[in-house]
Amino acid sequence: MFRNTYDSDNTVFSPQGRLHQVEYALEAVKQGSAAVGLRSKTHAVLLALKRSTGELASYQQKMFRIDDHVGIAIAGLTSDARVLSNFMRQQAMASRMLYNRPVPVNRLVSAIADKAQVNTQEYGRRPYGVGFLVIGQDALGPHLYEFSPSGTSYEYYAMSIGARSQSAKTYLEKHFASFADCTLEELVQHGLHALRETLQQDKELTINNTSVGILSGPGSSFKIVEGPELQPFLSLMVPKADPAAPAAAPAEDVQMEDAS
Amino acid sequence: MFRNTYDSDNTVFSPQGRLHQVEYALEAVKQGSAAVGLRSKTHAVLLALKRSTGELASYQQKMFRIDDHVGIAIAGLTSDARVLSNFMRQQAMASRMLYNRPVPVNRLVSAIADKAQVNTQEYGRRPYGVGFLVIGQDALGPHLYEFSPSGTSYEYYAMSIGARSQSAKTYLEKHFASFADCTLEELVQHGLHALRETLQQDKELTINNTSVGILSGPGSSFKIVEGPELQPFLSLMVPKADPAAPAAAPAEDVQMEDAS
Amino acid sequence: MFRNTYDSDNTVFSPQGRLHQVEYALEAVKQGSAAVGLRSKTHAVLLALKRSTGELASYQQKMFRIDDHVGIAIAGLTSDARVLSNFMRQQAMASRMLYNRPVPVNRLVSAIADKAQVNTQEYGRRPYGVGFLVIGQDALGPHLYEFSPSGTSYEYYAMSIGARSQSAKTYLEKHFASFADCTLEELVQHGLHALRETLQQDKELTINNTSVGILSGPGSSFKIVEGPELQPFLSLMVPKADPAAPAAAPAEDVQMEDAS
Amino acid sequence: MFRNTYDSDNTVFSPQGRLHQVEYALEAVKQGSAAVGLRSKTHAVLLALKRSTGELASYQQKMFRIDDHVGIAIAGLTSDARVLSNFMRQQAMASRMLYNRPVPVNRLVSAIADKAQVNTQEYGRRPYGVGFLVIGQDALGPHLYEFSPSGTSYEYYAMSIGARSQSAKTYLEKHFASFADCTLEELVQHGLHALRETLQQDKELTINNTSVGILSGPGSSFKIVEGPELQPFLSLMVPKADPAAPAAAPAEDVQMEDAS
Amino acid sequence: MFRNTYDSDNTVFSPQGRLHQVEYALEAVKQGSAAVGLRSKTHAVLLALKRSTGELASYQQKMFRIDDHVGIAIAGLTSDARVLSNFMRQQAMASRMLYNRPVPVNRLVSAIADKAQVNTQEYGRRPYGVGFLVIGQDALGPHLYEFSPSGTSYEYYAMSIGARSQSAKTYLEKHFASFADCTLEELVQHGLHALRETLQQDKELTINNTSVGILSGPGSSFKIVEGPELQPFLSLMVPKADPAAPAAAPAEDVQMEDAS
Amino acid sequence: MFRNTYDSDNTVFSPQGRLHQVEYALEAVKQGSAAVGLRSKTHAVLLALKRSTGELASYQQKMFRIDDHVGIAIAGLTSDARVLSNFMRQQAMASRMLYNRPVPVNRLVSAIADKAQVNTQEYGRRPYGVGFLVIGQDALGPHLYEFSPSGTSYEYYAMSIGARSQSAKTYLEKHFASFADCTLEELVQHGLHALRETLQQDKELTINNTSVGILSGPGSSFKIVEGPELQPFLSLMVPKADPAAPAAAPAEDVQMEDAS
Amino acid sequence: MFRNTYDSDNTVFSPQGRLHQVEYALEAVKQGSAAVGLRSKTHAVLLALKRSTGELASYQQKMFRIDDHVGIAIAGLTSDARVLSNFMRQQAMASRMLYNRPVPVNRLVSAIADKAQVNTQEYGRRPYGVGFLVIGQDALGPHLYEFSPSGTSYEYYAMSIGARSQSAKTYLEKHFASFADCTLEELVQHGLHALRETLQQDKELTINNTSVGILSGPGSSFKIVEGPELQPFLSLMVPKADPAAPAAAPAEDVQMEDAS
C-alpha cells in the first residue's frame, strides 16, 4: 500500500485539511458490533448486538449504566470504553454530591467530547477508539446522543453505530417519523428490527446476543433487559421478509480483537 | 503525490517562508458549510448553512451565543469550535464578573487569535481546524470579525467563510456599499442571497438548512432564528435568476466528517 | 518483510482502525506456555504448564498467589507479570488495610486492565506483554477472568491462554456445559485434560511441568499444588486416545526468551 | 526540488554554518507588503503599504502604536506581529509603572531581539515570521531600528523591509545624505517616494493603501496618518517619471496568506 | 545487513511479540567472560574467568561483595554492573539500618529485576547490558540466582552466564544431581571444571585469570579467593581429557570493549 | 551533496569521534568578518573589520565592552553574540557586587566556555554560532583569549578569527616574537597590518570599517577607537607592498546574513 | 560509507549487543595527543604530549591538578575534560570540607565513571568524548587509573591513552615488570621513552611539547614539570635507536579540532 505521509500523527493535518488518525479511530468504531438507539416523546431505548468471545464466556457486555437516568451502548475498543464510561460515572456522581442533582445529559456528553477532542490535537496520546450511543432522561425529557472519538456529540431522534450500522440507519430513516408517539413496546420493536438489519444473512437475534436498554420515563431508572426476559420482545418480531436476499458486503464485518 | 518535506510540523517554515500546517488547517475551514456575516451602522447579522447528518438528527448547529452581545457562526472542525467557543464564553463571563461589564468584542476576538497563534508556533499541538465569523455589539456599535486558525482576526463590513464562500463573497462585494444604511430586514435579505450563492445548483435554502443570527442594536441580545420562524425571511427572497447556469465546481464541496 | 508503517508506535491507529503494537503484545502472550482456568458453582481452578529453563533450575513459576482469595496464572513476559502481580498484591493489601475486607475480584481485575489501557494510548511506554488467568472467590462465588494486555478483562466459565491454547479451548468448549456442577476433583481432571491438549505429541504432563491452583470454596485460601502432591491427580487421567494423531502445528510453539 | 537535509529544524546548522529555518523565516518577512522608515535629526517617520483583503474589509493595519514615544511598522506574519507587539507594549508599560519613565528605545528593541534569538536556538518553537521597523524618540533624539526574526536589531538612518523593499532601499540610498536636515514634510515626501518604488507598475499610492506614522519631535506622540488626512501628502508627490519602465520581477511579489 | 525495523527502540514490540532491544542487551551479556555458580544444601560458590586488559593491569574484577551474606559475579558491560551492584549494596545497607537484619536474598534480586524491567518498557533509557549470578545465604539456606537485563531473575541449582557458557552448562547438567550433598571443596572442583569448559582450546585456568567466591554456610561471610590462595584448588583439578578435541565455536567469543 | 548521517544532531558522535554540529558552528564563526587580537607585556588590543549593512546604517558593531577591564570582538552570529556578551556582563557585575572586585578574566572566559559546552552535549539547543576574542587586564597583566563555540577557550599571544583570518595569523606568526615589548602604538600598527591581510585585494582599512579596542595598562578602561579618532593610526600604516598579488580565495568570503 | 543503523543514539544496542555511540566517543579519545602514566611502589607519574595550536599560543594544557594528592592527564575533547575535571575538584573539595580528609582516589574515579555511565544509558546527552589518566596518592600508596567515556575505570601499573598510544603501551609492556622498584627519576625516564614512541618519525620530545606530572610519595603534592625545568629529564634520554624505521600508520594521527 502506498504510504500516506500525513497519517502517522494525530496532530498533523493533511494538505486536504483532514486528520487521518481521527478517521482511523472512527474505523475502530465501525468494527465494533452494532448498537441502535431511538426515542419517543417519553422514552428512550438502546439495542445492541453482543459479540460472543466463544462459548466459554457470557457474551461481551455492550451496555453500561452510568447513573439512574443515563445509560450507554458502545462500539469499538472495549478498554477505551471502560475508561470513558468510568469518567462519565465520576461526573455523574460528582453532580449528585456537589449539586445534589442528576447531571444534565448534554453536559455529561460534552464532558467526554471535550476529553476526546484533546486527544485529536495534542501530542502524546492517540484518539479514543470507541463510539457511544447515550440515552438519558432529564427535565427536558428523553435524549439520544452519539459520541464520536473525533470529539463531537450530536443529538439524534434515532441512530446506529458499529458494524453494518448503515443497514440499521436505513431502517430507522424509513420509520423515524412515527417514533415520537410510540409506546415503549413499539420503540423496542422498531429498535430490534433495525438491529436485525445489521446481522449477516444467516444470523438471528437471540436472547443471548441481544441487549436492550430502557429509560421508560421521568423518574424511572436505566434498565438492561437480557436473556430470558428478552424473549417476549423477540417473539413479537416480524419474521425476515426475504431470506434469499443477498447478504450485506462481508468486507464490512471484519472483526477486531477487543472491539465490542 | 510528491512528498512536501516542510509540511509535517506546524513549527517548520518552508523555504518560501510558509507554514504548511497552518495552510492545511485553513483547508479544514474551507470544508465546513458556508457562513455569511454582514453589518449596517446599527445591526449585524450572521447567516449559515446547516449541514444535515441525515434525517435522524436535527441539522448540526452552526451558530452559538457567546454572550448577550456576541454570537458566532463556525466553519470547520466542530470539536475545535466547541473548545474555542467555550473559551470565549469563559472570557465573556469573567469580564462580567470581574469588571461588571460586557467584554469588548475586539478583546474577545484577540483572545482566541492569541490562543490560536501559539498552536502555529510551539510544538505539541496542531493548529485549530475551525474558522469563526463573530458579530458583536458594543459602545462602538456593531462589529463583524473573521477569526482564522492562522491566529489572525480581521474586521469586515461583510464576509463569508466555508465551502463555496467565494461565491458569497462575490455577491457581497457587489452589494456591500449599500449595507451601511440597511434595515435589519434588508441586511438579512442580502445575507440570504449571498448564502444561497454557496449552494449547489439543485439546492435551495429552507427553514431546515438555514440559520440566521441577529444583533439588532444596542441593548438587544444575540438571537438565533431557525425553523418556521425563518419562513417569512425566505419567502421574501428573489427567485434564482438562471436555473440553467452551471453549478460551481463540485470539487470544492468535498465533505469532511465533523466539519460544520 | 514488507514494512508496515503503522505498527511502530502504540499510539497510532492503522487505516483499518487497528493498534498494531497492542496486537504484537498479544503475540507475546501466545508465546508463553499454556494455562487453563475453569470454575464450577463453588470452586475455581487454574492449571498451567511450567516451562523448564533446563535441568539446572526448578521449572519456572507459572502461578502466583495475590491474596487468600485470589490467584493467577500467567503467559508471556515474566518480568511484566511480576510488575503487574505486585501491583495486584498492593491493591489487595490496601483493601484489607483501608476497608478491612478482601478486595472484590472484579475490582482487582479492572485495576490492572485500566493500568494496561494507559500503555495502549499514551506515549512513553509499550503495552504490557503478558496475559493472566485470574481466579477468585468473593461474596458472589468463584470467578474466572482473563486479563489481556489490550486493557480488557472478561469473565469466563473456562478459558485457556498461551501457546497452543486453542487446543485446550476446543476441549473446554466440548465439556464446559458440565462444569457448573463438578466437584473439585472433576474440575481438576477436566483442566488437566484440557492442558494436555496444548502439549506437543511426544510430551506428557508430569509432576514437574504441571501446576494446579485451587480455590475450593468460601473461606478457603488459594493453594498451589505441585510436585509429588500432584501425582494422585495425574494418575487419574485418561490415557491419550490416539498417539498417532498429528501434533498441533509446531509453528505456534516458537519459544521466546523470558516467556512463561 | 532537491531536499536540503539541514533545514527542517531551527536548531541545526548546515555544513556551511547556516541556520536554514531562520533564513526561511526571513522569507516570510519578504512576503509582507513593504514598509519604509527614515529619520532626520529631529523627526522619524514610518510609511507602509496596507494590503487589502478585498473590498469587504478595511485595509489591514500595518502600523501599531507601542507607547507615546514608539511606533512600529510590520512585514510578515500578522499573528506573530500581534504577539510581539503586545510584548513590546507590556515592556513599555512596565517601564512607566516600575521606573516612572518611558522605556529607552534600544532596550525595547533588544528585548524582542532576545526573545527572537531563543526561537533560533532552542527546540520547541519556530522562529518568528515577522520583521519590524521601529521608530522612537528618547533623550538621544529620534531612532529607527530594524528588528529581524534572526534575533538581531540594527539602527538605521533609513530602511525598508517587505516585498520589493530593495527598490525602496535604492531610492533611500540615493537620497539619505539629505535626510538629517529634512523638515517633517520633506521626510514624509522622501518616504512616500521610496514606498512608491515598491509598487507594481500599474499601482499607485492612495489614501486607502498607504499609512504614515510620525514622531515629530521631543514630547510629541506617535501618530498614524491614514485616509483623507493623507491626501495633502500624496498630492505633493512628484508624478512617476517613466510609466513605460518595466515592472520589478513579479516573482518577488507572491502573496502569502496572513502576511502583512 | 537487512534493516530490522522493530529493533531500534526498547519500547516497541516486533510483529512476533519480541523486544529486540532486550535481546540485543542479552548479547552484551554473552560477550562478557564466563561465570559459573552452583550450590549444595549448605554452601554456594561462584567461579569466574577474569578478562585481562593486557599486562599493564590486574585482571578485571568479576566478583563483588554486596553484603556479608551476598556476592555476585558479572558478565557484560562493566559500567552497568557497577551501577546495579551499588544499588544492591544500598538496598542491603538500608535493610540493616531500617530493619536491623540482612536483606532476604530473593528481595534483593527482585529489586534489581524490577529496576531492569522499567528499562525494557519505558522510553528514555536502554536496557541494562549486564547479567549477574547472585549467591546468598539466608534463613532458607544457600541460594543461587541469575539476574538478566530482561528484568527476570530465576533461582538455579547451578548456572553459567557469559561467553561459551553453554559449554559450562553442559558440564553442570551432567553432574548437578550430585551437588546437593557436596562438600565446599567438591563444589569448587565442579565449578572449576565447568568454568574450564568455557576456555578456548589452548587456554588454562590460572591463579591470575580465575576468581572463586564462597559462601560456606550460615553465619559465614562472602569471600573471594584469588591469586596464590587459589593454587590448591587448581592443583586438584583433573587434567583435560582430550587436548585434540575441537574448540568451541570461536564465533561466540567475540570480545567487546568494556565487557567483563 | 552526499548526506552525512551523523551531523544532524549535536549530541551524536560520528564513527570518527567527531561532533559535526560543533564543526558547522565553527563555520558560522569563519563567516563573520575578521577580528585580530594581540598583547604586549603591558597592553592588549583588539582590531576588527566592521561589516557594512549598506549605506543606510552605521557599520555593525564588532566590539563590546564587558567591564572596565574586559572587552571583546566577535565573529559569527550577531544575535548569539549579544546573548553571550550579556551573560558576560552579568557575571562581571555580579563579581563587583558580591565580591567587590573585578572578575578574573580567565574565570569570565571559562564561564561562557562552560555554557557553550552544554550546547554541544545536551539535546534541545544548537551550539552557539559565534566566536570571541577577549582581552582583559587583571593582577596577572594583560590577557588575550579566544572563545570558540566548541566550548573551549585558549590564551594566546596574538590571534585572529573570522573570514580570511588565516592571512592575519600568517602575519602575526611572522611578527609575534616582537610583541611582548611593543608600545601600545606599535601593537596597534601590528594589529592593523594583520587585519589588512584579511581584506580582499581591492579593499582598504578606513575609519568607517575598522574598530580598535584598547586596554592600555593596569587601571585603564577598555576603550573603543572608531571613526576620525582612528585616522592617525591608519595614516601610519605602511602601504600595501604588492597590489598585483592575487586575492585570497573568494570562496572563503561567502557572506551570511547576520554574521558579524 | 554504508549506513549503520544502530549508531545514531547512545541508548540503542546493536544486534551484537554493542553501543556504537560509546565506541565513537572512544574514537574521540584516540584522537587526542598521547598521555602516559606509570607508578612504582612509592611514586606515580604522568607524561603527556602537548598539542600546539600554532605559534601564537602556549601549547595546550594536558595535565590538571585536582587536589594535592590527585592529578590527571587528558586525551580527547578539551571542553568535556574541563567539565569533568571541575566536577572532580568539587568532589575533592567536598571531601575536605565535609569529612576533613582527602577524597580516596578510587572514590573520585568512580564518581566520574558513574557520571559518564548515565550518558551511555539515558536519552538527552551524548557520552563524554574524553579519557583521563588519573594518578593519586592515598593511604594505600600511589594509584594509576584510566577513566574512559564508556563509564569504566580500571587501575593499572602503567597505561597510555590517545593518539598512537599503542606504541607507548608496547614499550610499557616490555618494561613494566621493573617499575615497582623504580626511583622517581627512573619512572620518569621510562615514561618519557614510552611517550616518545607515540611521536611521528621526525618529531622529538622538547621542553615545549612535553608535560610531566609527579606524585613523589606520601604527603607530597601533585606537581607539573614543564619548560626549562624539564630539560634535565629530556637530556638523560637514550637517543632513538633506528631513525630509518618506518613511521606508525599516519592514519591513526588524524587531528580533530579541540582534541587534546
Image (spheres, coloured by chain):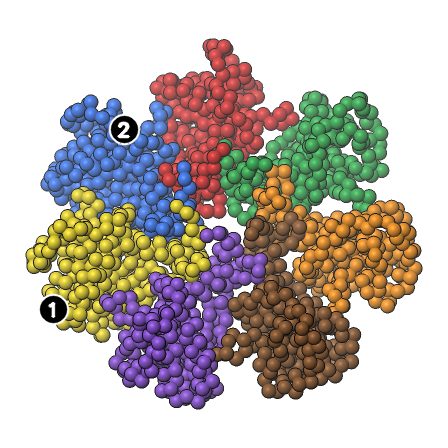
Chain colours: A purple, B brown, C yellow, D orange, E blue, F green, G red
| Residue located 57% across and 28% down the image | G60
Does label 1 lie on the same chain as label 2?
Answer: no
Q: Position of residue D83 (x, y in %)?
A: 66, 61
Name which residue lies at 69% across and 80% down.
Answer: B239
From the viewer's perspective, is residue B145 above or below residue F253?
below
> Where in the figure is residue D120, as x and y percent of width and height?
62, 49
Q: Could you say which is closer to the camera, residue D109 or residue A241?
A: A241
Q: Quadrant of residue E3?
A: top left
Q: Please name the amino acid that badge 1 sits on.
A: Thr
Residue A39 occupies quadrant: bottom left
- Residue nearest the observer in this picture, A72 or C240: C240
Determine the chain carrying the residue at label 1. Answer: C
Residue tagged 2 = E209
Other-residue count near label 1 (Cα within 10 Å), few / some / many at <14 / 14–19 / ≥20: some
Callout 2: SS: loop
According to the picture, the residue beneath numbered tag 1 turns out to be C183
> Which part of the image, by quadrant, shows the C terminus of chain F?
top right
Neighbourhood count class around disc 2 (C-alpha, 10 Å): few under 14, some 14–19, many 20 upward: some
Q: Can residue B212 be seen in this view?
A: yes
In this rendering, which labeled residue sits more in front, label 2 or label 1? 1
Q: Is residue E157 above or below residue F42?
A: below
Pick the residue in front: B67 or E142: B67
What is the three-letter code of the residue carrying label 2?
Asn
Q: Residue at x 23, y 54 (%)?
A: C164
Q: What element carries label 1?
A: loop
Give the percent coordinates (x, y) of residue D225.
Answer: 83, 64
